Amino acid sequence: MLMLALNGASDTVSIIVRGAIRNLETPDEIRGRMVSVNMLFFAGGPQLGEIEAGAAARLLGTPLSVLVGGLACMFASGAVAAATPELRHKERISTEPRNHGTTEPRNHGTTEPRNHGTTEPRN
């Protein structure tokens, strides 16, 4: 039971950190698309994993399928870590607004309405 509680707590921390990084680092113009892709993987990923785990257990037996799945997960995590060193070395998430390559300042903290991807020009 203790391990299940620790697993749930670490999953909660992971969800919060991923959400914070996504919201702070993604430009406003594509944030909705980014969230939709995230939800696609969040909703569909576990079901695909269950299919794979069931097929592996049937072919290899339960103990070996658990071992192979754990090793595959460790390998995938290592591959992602190797491919994205900037994430491994990220010390702090900035809470300051970013312009993401634009020269137009954002209007955080003002009462001016924001243009959220509509076609009408800004005033």
Image: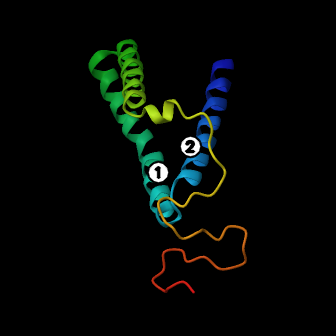
How would you rate the neighbour count of disc 2 (Cα within 10 Å): few for under 14, some for 14-19, many for 20 or more? few
Tag 1 residue: 38
Say if 63 sits above or below 16 in the image.
Answer: above
Amino acid under label 1? Answer: Asn
**Residue at image coords 48%, 52%:** 39
**In this rendering, is residue 80 above or below 39?**
above
Tell me if label 1 and label 2 are in contact, CB under 8 Å. Answer: yes
Under mark 2, the amino acid is Arg
Mark 1, other Cα within 10 Å: few <14 / some 14–19 / many ≥20: some
Q: Quadrant of residue 60?
A: top left
Quadrant in which the C terminus appears:
bottom right
Relative side of 90 to 46, left or right? right
Please provide percent x and percent y for residue 76.
Answer: 37, 27
Residue 72 location (% of width, % of height)? 36, 22
Residue at coordinates 48% horizontally, 46% vertically from top-left?
42
Count of numbered marks: 2
Q: x%, y% of residue 118?
A: 48, 80
Residue pictured at 57% horizontal, 46% vertical: 21
Percent across and percent down for residue 88 are 50, 30
Residue topped by disc 2:
18
Q: Can you tell which quarter of the image residue 93 is in?
A: top right
